Amino acid sequence: MIPKGSEAIRHLVTRVAQDLIPKARDAYTATDLGYFTLLLGMVAQDYDRAADVLVSEHAALQPILREAALHIDDASLKARIAEALAAEAPSLRVGDLTARSDVILRLLSDLHAAIEEAEVSGADWARTVNDEIWRFLEAHVAARAYQVAL
């Protein structure tokens, strides 16, 4: 057998759960091993979905950023949007995709604050973009939710 990715991690989880936890000398060690299996299960889920989530979210943010850039007055924010829209990850490695995502999510946070201020000030366009950002954030959270049995 040649273990691959999340399948290999799931094998480790099963091995720890079935072989090591029952042999634990005390409750503390058994509990520690239980947490270890839980965390490994979460790593397996991320292994399967990380690149897809990061690429999909980047694609979902692009139209939001483009729309906001049409209306935002802040030159610095506009420049950051243009830079983020032009940014390509150097590879599809999860670390590279995560680094790009970190930059764009920091930008989104700053942009969201500016858009909420614009909405309070009565800018007609701001409500639509704000709603799009909230929809993105809901999808962002859902895409990262872990399926764990507690």
Image: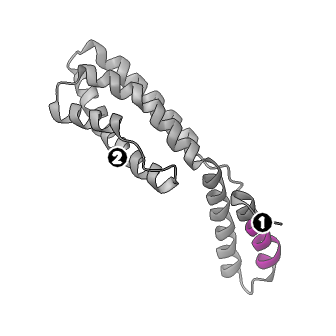
Q: In percent of the image, x 37 and y 17: which residue is there?
A: 128
**Vertical placement of 39 versus 61: above or below?**
below
Asked if the stretch drawn in magenta spans residue 101, the answer is no
Magenta-drawn segment: 11-21
Q: In percent of the image, x 70 and y 58: which residue is there?
A: 6
**Residue 119 visible in the shown view:** no
Tell me the kind of residue under disc 1: His
Residue 135 placement (x, y as % from top left):
47, 28
Q: Which mark is residue 65?
A: none
Q: Earlier in the sequence, mark 2 or mark 1?
A: 1
Dot 1, how many residues are within 10 Å of its Cα: few (below 14), some (14-19), or many (20+)? few
Judging by the rendered image, the residue that carries numbered circle 2 is: 103
Element type at marker 1?
helix
Tell me the kind of residue under disc 2: Val
Residue 129 placement (x, y as % from top left):
36, 22
Residue 65 placement (x, y as % from top left):
34, 28
Number of numbered discs overlaid on the protein picture: 2
Judging by the rendered image, the residue that carries numbered circle 1 is: 11
Q: In percent of the image, x 16 and y 30: which residue is there?
A: 74
Q: Nearer the viewer, residue 104 or 93?
A: 93
